[in-house]
Image (spheres, rainbow, N blue to C red):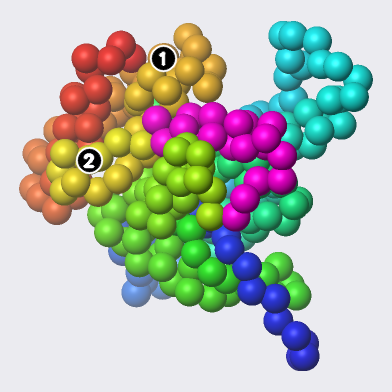
Amino acid sequence: MNDRYVWGEYVVASIDVLGQGCQFDRINDLVIDDIPKETLDDVANKTIRPVEFVRDKLEELFLWSQKQVEPKMAIAEEDRAEYDQSRATTPIRFQFYSDSVLAYVALRSTGYQLNDLWAVRDMFISVGGTLLMTLAIIDASFRAAIELGIGINLADGDLYGPIRAGAYELEKKADFPRIIIGPRLFEYLKSFSEGRPRIPCRTERELRGSKDAAASCARMIAKDTVDGLLILDYLGSDFRERTNGDSQDEICREAWEYVKREFGKQSASGHNKVAEKFRKLRGYFKSSLTRPI
């Protein structure tokens, strides 16, 4: 046991891949020898494959969003060290538990708060992009929540504390495939975007950069018309500007087709509870059709 525990603030994404239980019901309480191989293969394809896809894409998109791009304007040599530090991203760590994923960032671990805001941006891009690709490519979905709070990183890398429970409870409120943004995280972004961080920035350059980065993140957040909760607006123009142009538009269209198809299928099958979730998701997509996708 440690004789000293170090608490800190974390931004945490709690992610739950949906549809697992109804698939497992197909083989639950049966003797494995009595289950056709085709059924076992189909259940695996509809459960394990989406989980592995989500895990892989989260890490892949995070690494993509971290790529450093040289500035369009020349940086004076005396400013290069601070510029390079300001463009770094606080590491995002992942924990995987069956059909759940926890991604988290330890704030102020680099001593440069702008790094944390780049990490929040990267988390938005990673989680939002993965949800879109999950809908579009493998006809699956997840719900998620991203929130800020207090926790402690245990020796084995396991995040513990109130933020973990809080993010999980917020994720359950998501109910259908969407990404809830917690109120504490939104206030954190708002304070930076208004130039009044809770902890002062070390330099004027860091303050300006933090203000711009936080404002960029805040523009990727919208209020859901279903219940007024804040959500990551992964179909919005500000989100799409930071992702992959034409290919992103194609992914949006494929995701929209899946949502319509799944709503029709669940409605026709009498699965009203699932159909209602896709009706709500369809509403989000329909409300975004005024924004070209």
Q: Is residue 86 magenta?
A: no
Foreground: 182 or 65? 182
Q: Quadrant of residue 184?
A: bottom left
Specify start and end residues of the magenta stretch as a single range. 199-220
Instruction: Check disc 1: other Cα within 10 Å, few if <14, some if 14-19, many if 20+.
Output: some
Q: Which residue is mark 1?
A: 249
Foreground: 56 or 48? 56
Q: Is residue 127 visible?
A: no
Q: Secondary structure at mark 2?
A: loop
Q: Quadrant of the C terminus?
A: top left
Q: Quadrant of the N terminus?
A: bottom right
Residue 224: numbered disc: 2
The location of residue 235, given as percent across then percent down, is: 35, 26
CA gap between label 1 and label 2 equals 21 Å
N-terminal label among 1 and 2: 2
Q: Is residue 128 left or right of 52 when viewed as pictured?
A: left
Instruction: Check disc 2: other Cα within 10 Å, few if <14, some if 14-19, many if 20+.
Output: some
Question: Identity of the amino acid at label 2?
Answer: Asp
Q: Secondary structure at mark 1?
A: helix
Residue lying at 30% horizontally and 11% vertically, measured from the top left:
292
Question: Identity of the amino acid at label 1?
Answer: Asp
Q: Is residue 195 left or right of 25 when viewed as pictured?
A: right
Q: Are marks 1 and 2 in contact (CB under 8 Å)?
A: no
Residue lying at 66% horizontally and 29% vertically, measured from the top left:
64
The location of residue 36, given as percent across then percent down, is: 41, 55
